[in-house]
Amino acid sequence: SYAVAGLPPRRLRGWISPTWFDFHDTGRDQLEFFVEMAGLRPSHRVLDIACGVGRLAIPLARYLNGRGSYDGFDIKEELVDWCRSKISTRRPNFQFQLARVATRWSPNEQVSVDRYCFPYQDERFDFAYAGSIFTHILPGGACNYLEQTARVLRPGGRRQPFQTASQQR
């Protein structure tokens, strides 16, 4: 089975999912949207920018097949560690990396958001998702992240920034 072992602890879910969001329902709804509206396929290579504690990775673990893959990165080490121990151990094609980027949550890091280079080769991914990172970074960082996303997407790849229900209308 591709099931993930358990729900992340509430203290970890709180970093990415406000208390009024249901962690599982939100991840499942995002996946359904990606499949129906953005053309995500089980064999796609997916990048999750600022992946948090696996809200999207968990439903993708059931959806992506052996040809598909998932890579996520985040600045919070405890979130990455949980994903590695609960998801990567069961799905070796699901990888999580710690992004050592200077932010208000990680001020001791040396690389700024506007200079961070995604740790992936050019044209590696079919699909890229950024949950809410653009609400937390300044324009220089946002431009860099958009440029990095374009670099790592294959020609014809899809970008899917998170949109609220009102933005989808």
Image (cartoon, rainbow, N blue to C red):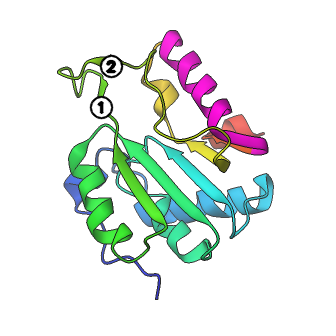
Tell whether 35 sits left or right of 5.
right
Judge whether 152 appears above or below 134 on screen: below
Local crowd at mark 2 within 10 Å, few (<14), some, or many (≥20)? some
- Return the x and y of residue 90 as percentages of the image width and height: 38, 77
Q: Which residue has dot 1 on it?
A: 100
Amino acid type of the residue that numbered disc 1 sits on in the rendered structure: Arg
Is residue 40 rendered magenta in the image? no
Q: Residue at x 62, y 45 (%)?
A: 128
Res 154 quadrant in image: top right
Q: Secondary structure at mark 1?
A: loop
Q: Quadrant of residue 137?
A: top left
Q: Is residue 96 visible?
A: yes
Secondary structure that dominates the magenta span: helix
**Residue designated by label 2:** 111
Residue found 66% across the figure and 43% down from its top: 165
Choose between 124 and 104: the one closer to the eye: 124
Residue at x 61% of width, y 71% of height:
64
Q: Secondary structure at mark 2?
A: strand
Q: Which residues are magenta?
A: 139-157
Q: Crowding near pointer 1: few (<14 within 10 Å), some, many (20+)?
A: many
Q: Amino acid at mark 2?
A: Val
135 or 96: nearer the eye?
A: 96
Q: Quadrant of the C terminus?
A: top right
Residue displayed at 23% across by 45% down: 77
**Seen in the image, is 28 located left or right of residue 4?**
right
